[in-house]
Image: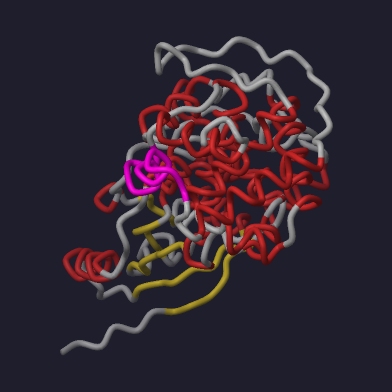
């Protein structure tokens, strides 16, 4: 069996620019396995580079030295979209088949307010230098590695992967305002997710807390809704470019989390509300007592009206005690049959969710 050795090193963005200018780098379309990136994904990559954050490994293959130019040659076998994006951003002339409609883009202000709507030439010198000096982690295959071996290598790499869940797929598809808000708000609450035991480390690694945060955003904007991927995806898409309620949604969500923390102990939350179903019910119950909870929409796809600014109502001690007692009864399964059925049924259905919320707030006995 042939042993394949790869060279592990780092190359600057400037190196790739130089190679393209001298004609010693090839973007190999034979290994392109994904659709062309949307402008949002391209902007997100540039912002990642500007911030000095890591990106996935680039895989190159060394080719035989060009006899005429005496320069070494190489091609990109994985990471072509990243390389193509950064080259198109820096200098469109570097990409042989550059298409303005497909390849031209600027940094989105959603990803970076300071640099929003700027091209590479519009950036301050400091940021242009930062981009050119950014280092990619690179693995290079030797020149005698043929296409079949490379395809087998990537098949082996991908065979050990786990199928992407719904939120991971959204993360790969959307790069706009709603997605950015959901991820920022979920990250803000990271310590609470951990302390309250709502999600395991593996679930957090797989973005479950981001999906639940998205559901809370839908709740604030549109009332209690069923958890289904089509509905959540619709909000990500509808508010990808414009999300006028972003500040109001964020303000209300943070206020509810603060109220939960100030009203209940971490251990109590973990024991009585420490799973996704019950924490959704707890959040909704607190929200309904502090703000106007919109009624269940008649049409799932209906676009919600703008949220009007609303000051939160204060919570009486009796209401907190009511929720605490109801949570304890649920944890011991000392509940009415209707509530018991809601807990054992499809807890992602709007009707079942509402039963739990009404029980927590004393409307369902």
Count of numbered badges drawn on the protein: 0
Left or right for 157, reference 73: left
Q: Position of residue 75 (x, y in %)?
A: 37, 59
- Residue 303: within the magenta? no
Residue beneath the point at 77% across and 44% down: 259
Q: Which range of residues does the magenta coloring cover? A: 335-348
Q: Quadrant of residue 109?
A: top right
Who is closer to the viewer here, 129 or 320? Answer: 320
Residue at image coords 59%, 48%: 326
**Above or below: residue 47 compared with residue 228:** below
Picture coordinates of residue 34 (x, y %)?
32, 44
Whether residue 92 can be seen here: no
Q: Residue at x 49, y 60 (%)?
A: 332
**Which quarter of the image is occupied by the N terminus?**
bottom left
Q: Measured from the top left, where is residue 318 in percent x and y?
A: 77, 41
Q: How is the image coloured?
A: secondary structure
Tell me, yes or no, if residue 217 can be seen here: yes
**Residue 340 is a magenta residue:** yes
Residue 192 sits in which quadrant? bottom right
Q: Is residue 285 left or right of residue 319?
A: left
Is 288 situated left or right of 60 in this image? right
Residue positioned 58% across, 64% down in the render? 271
331, above or below 72, in the image: above
Q: Nearer the viewer, residue 104 or 281?
A: 281
Percent from the top left, x then y, of residue 179?
56, 36
């Amino acid at each position: 069996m042939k042993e394949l050795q790869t060279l592990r090193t780092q190359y600057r963005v400037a190196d790739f620019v130089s190679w393209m200018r001298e004609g010693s780098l090839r973007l190999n379309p034979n290994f392109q396995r994904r659709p062309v990136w949307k402008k949002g994904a391209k902007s997100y990559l540039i912002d990642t580079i500007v911030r000095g954050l890591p990106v996935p490994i680039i895989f190159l293959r060394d080719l035989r030295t060009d006899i005429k130019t005496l320069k070494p040659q190489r091609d990109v076998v994985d990471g072509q979209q990243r390389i193509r994006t950064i080259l198109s951003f820096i200098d469109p002339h570097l990409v042989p088949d550059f298409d303005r409609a497909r390849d031209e883009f600027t940094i989105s202000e959603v990803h970076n307010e300071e640099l929003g709507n700027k091209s590479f030439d519009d950036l301050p010198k400091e940021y242009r230098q930062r981009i050119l000096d950014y280092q990619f982690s690179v693995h290079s295959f030797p020149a005698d590695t043929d296409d079949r071996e490379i395809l087998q290598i990537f098949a082996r790499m991908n065979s050990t992967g786990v199928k992407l869940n719904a939120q991971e797929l959204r993360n790969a598809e959307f790069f706009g305002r709603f997605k950015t808000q959901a991820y920022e708000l979920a990250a803000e609450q990271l310590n609470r997710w951990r302390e309250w035991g709502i999600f395991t480390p593996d679930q957090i690694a797989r973005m479950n807390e981001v999906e639940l945060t998205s559901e809370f955003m839908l709740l604030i904007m549109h009332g209690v809704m069923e958890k289904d991927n089509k509905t959540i995806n619709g909000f990500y898409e509808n508010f990808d470019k414009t999300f006028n309620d972003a500040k109001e949604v964020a303000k209300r969500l943070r206020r509810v989390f603060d109220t939960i923390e100030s009203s209940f102990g971490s251990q109590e939350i973990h024991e009585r509300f420490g799973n996704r179903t019950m924490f959704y019910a707890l959040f909704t119950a607190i929200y309904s007592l502090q703000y106007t909870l919109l009624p269940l929409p008649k049409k799932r796809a209906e676009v919600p009206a703008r949220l009007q600014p609303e000051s939160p109502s204060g919570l009486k001690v009796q209401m907190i005690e009511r929720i605490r007692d109801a949570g304890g009864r649920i944890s011991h399964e000392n509940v009415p049959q209707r509530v018991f059925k809601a807990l054992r049924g499809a807890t992602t259905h709007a009707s079942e969710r509402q039963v739990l919320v009404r029980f927590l707030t004393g409307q369902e006995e």
